[in-house]
Image (cartoon, helix red, strand yellow):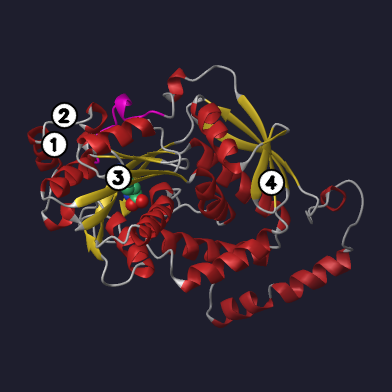
C-alpha cells in the first residue's frame, strides 16, 4: 500500500508518518513551501528518520503569491472582517500538489493530519476529492483514531523521535500571508496571549519610536512596489511582514466561526496582509463609483466566505474572481501608509483613474451647483422620505 502524506513536519503529521510507516505502508511525504519559515531540509530529514520511503519538497511560494494571495488582495479578503485567510488559502494549493504526486506515484491513498473539529479537513478533502479518482482513498488518521496532541506526542516518543519543542505548546500554521496560532492558554478566550505566541511582530510597546513610512504602488489591484522599489509579490509580502511587523503592527485576536459548528479563539500575525488590504481598499474608494464600491463589498464577502469554507473549487469562486479582476483593472495608483507602535494609518492616496476632483471639491473656487439646481435636487431627492413620513405621522 502506497500513501502520499501531506507532511508539514509538525506534531500531528509526524506522528501519522510514524504510524503509517509502522504499519508497513510505503509512505511518500510531500512538504509544500508556501513561505513558512521552517528549515525545509530538517523537515526532509525528519521525514526520512520517521520512515518515509521518498520525500518531495515543492517550492510553491511564487505560485501561492500569484494564484492565491493576489486574488485575496483584490477581494480585500478578511473573513468576518478580521482574518486574512492565510491557512484557508494555502490548503487548496497543498492539496493540489499532493494530488499531483499521488497520480505520478500511482498511490493507493493520500493522507493528511486534520482533525474532525477544524476547517482544514473540509479544505483538504474537498480539493483532493475534486482532483483524484475515487479509488484513491483519503486517509485522515487524526480524525479516524481521534488522535489528541497528547496521543501524538506519545506515538512519537514511543517511535523514538522526540517532539519538536516549538510544537509543544501551540498549534501553529504558517505561510507567507498569515501565521495562525492556536492552543495552549489561547483556548480560554479570557486569557491574554503570552509573548511567546508571537514570532512576526514585536510587542507594540517595544516598537521603535520613529514611525515607518511606506508608499505602496498598485497596478490593476496588485502591489508591485514599495517606496519606489519594484518587487515581485512574494518578496514584497515578505518585506512588509518584516518591516511592518518590526513596528508592532499585524496582531489579531479573533473569536471565529468555523465551518463545523464551533467557535474558536484564533490569534494571528499578518503584518503585510493587513497593510496591503487596507491600502488596496483605500485605493478602491478613490477610484470606484459609490455603486461599484457597495457592490464590490458583496462580491468580496462571498469570495472570502467560499475560500474560508473550503470551497475553492466551487464555480462561483471562478465567476466572482472574473468580476473582481475586471473591477480591479482601475485599481492602479499609490497609497501612503504610516505604521507606528502597533497602529497603521493610510495617510494619502493617488490614482490616474480617480474621479475625485480637487477643483470640484474646493469650497473657494471652481464649479458650483447654482442655488436653483441645489434646491431642485433636494426637492426631488427627499420626496419619497417626506411623503412617507407625512403619511405615517412621524415627526
Ligand atoms: N482558523 C484558521 C482557519 O481555519 C486557522 C487554522 C490554523 N490551524 C492551526 N493549526 N493553527 O483557517
Q: Residue furthest bottom?
A: 391
- Residue underneath mark 3: 54
Check the picture and name the quadrant holding the N terminus: bottom left
Q: What is the secondary structure assignment of the residue under circle 2?
A: loop
Which residue shows up at 68% across the image and 73% down it? 382
- Residue underneath mark 4: 218
- Residue underneath mark 1: 156
Q: Residues within 10 Å of mark 1 (few under 14, many from 20)?
A: many
Mark sitting on residue 394: none
Q: Earlier in the sequence, mark 2 or mark 4?
A: 2
Region rendered in magenta? 189-199
Left or right: residue 233 compared with residue 24: right
Q: Earlier in the sequence, mark 1 or mark 4?
A: 1
* Disc 1: residue Cβ within 8 A of ligand 1's nearest atom: no
**Relative to the observer, which residue lies in front, 337 or 363?**
337
Cα separation between marks 3 and 1: 20 Å
**Relative to the observer, which residue lies in front, 25 or 332?**
25
Depth check, mark 2 against mark 4: the one in front is 2
- Residue underneath mark 2: 162
**Relative to the observer, which residue lies in front, 129 or 119?**
129
Disc 1 to disc 2: CB gap under 8 Å: yes
Q: Earlier in the sequence, mark 3 or mark 2?
A: 3
Q: Residues within 10 Å of mark 3 (few under 14, many from 20)?
A: some
Amino acid at each position: 500500500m502506497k500513501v502520499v502524506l501531506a507532511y508539514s513536519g509538525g506534531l500531528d503529521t509526524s506522528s501519522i508518518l510514524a504510524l503509517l510507516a509502522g504499519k508497513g505502508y510505503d509512505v511518500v511525504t510531500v512538504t509544500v513551501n508556501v513561505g513558512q519559515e521552517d528549515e525545509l531540509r530538517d523537515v526532509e530529514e525528519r521525514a526520512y528518520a520517521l520512515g518515509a520511503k521518498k520525500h518531495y519538497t515543492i517550492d510553491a511560494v511564487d505560485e501561492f503569491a500569484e494564484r492565491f494571495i493576489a486574488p485575496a488582495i483584490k477581494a480585500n479578503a478578511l473573513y468576518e472582517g478580521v482574518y486574512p485567510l492565510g491557512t484557508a488559502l494555502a490548503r487548496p494549493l497543498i492539496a493540489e500538489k499532493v494530488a499531483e504526486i499521488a497520480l505520478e506515484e500511482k498511490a493507493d491513498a493520500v493522507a493528511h493530519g486534520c482533525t474532525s473539529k477544524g476547517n482544514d479537513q473540509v479544505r483538504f478533502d474537498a480539493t483532493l476529492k475534486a482532483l483524484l479518482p475515487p479509488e484513491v482513498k483519503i486517509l485522515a488518521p487524526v480524525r479516524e483514531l481521534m488522535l489528541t496532541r497528547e496521543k501524538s506526542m506519545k506515538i512519537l516518543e514511543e517511535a523514538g523521535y522526540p517532539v519538536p519543542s516549538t510544537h509543544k505548546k501551540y498549534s501553529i500554521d504558517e505561510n507567507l500571508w498569515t501565521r495562525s496560532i492556536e492552543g495552549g492558554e489561547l483556548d480560554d478566550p479570557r486569557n491574554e496571549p503570552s509573548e511567546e505566541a508571537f514570532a512576526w511582530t514585536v510587542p507594540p510597546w517595544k516598537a521603535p519610536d520613529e514611525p515607518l513610512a511606506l508608499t505602496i504602488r498598485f497596478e490593476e489591484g496588485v502591489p508591485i512596489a514599495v517606496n519606489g522599489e519594484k518587487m515581485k509579490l512574494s518578496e514584497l509580502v515578505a518585506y512588509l511582514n518584516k518591516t511592518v511587523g518590526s513596528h508592532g503592527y499585524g496582531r489579531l485576536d479573533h473569536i471565529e466561526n468555523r465551518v463545523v459548528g464551533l467557535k474558536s479563539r484564533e490569534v494571528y500575525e499578518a503584518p503585510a496582509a493587513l497593510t496591503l488590504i487596507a491600502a488596496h481598499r483605500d485605493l478602491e474608494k478613490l477610484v470606484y463609483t459609490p455603486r461599484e464600491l457597495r457592490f464590490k463589498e458583496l462580491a468580496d464577502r462571498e469570495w472570502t466566505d467560499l475560500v474560508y469554507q473550503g470551497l475553492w473549487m466551487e464555480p462561483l469562486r471562478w465567476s466572482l474572481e472574473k468580476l473582481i479582476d475586471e473591477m480591479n483593472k482601475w485599481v492602479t495608483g499609490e497609497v501612503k501608509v504610516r505604521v507606528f507602535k502597533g497602529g497603521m494609518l493610510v495617510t494619502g492616496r493617488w490614482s490616474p483613474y480617480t474621479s475625485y476632483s480637487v477643483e470640484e471639491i474646493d469650497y473657494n473656487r471652481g464649479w458650483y451647483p447654482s442655488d436653483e439646481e441645489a434646491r431642485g435636487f433636494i426637492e426631488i431627492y427627499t420626496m419619497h422620505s417626506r411623503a412617507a413620513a407625512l403619511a405615517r405621522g412621524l415627526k
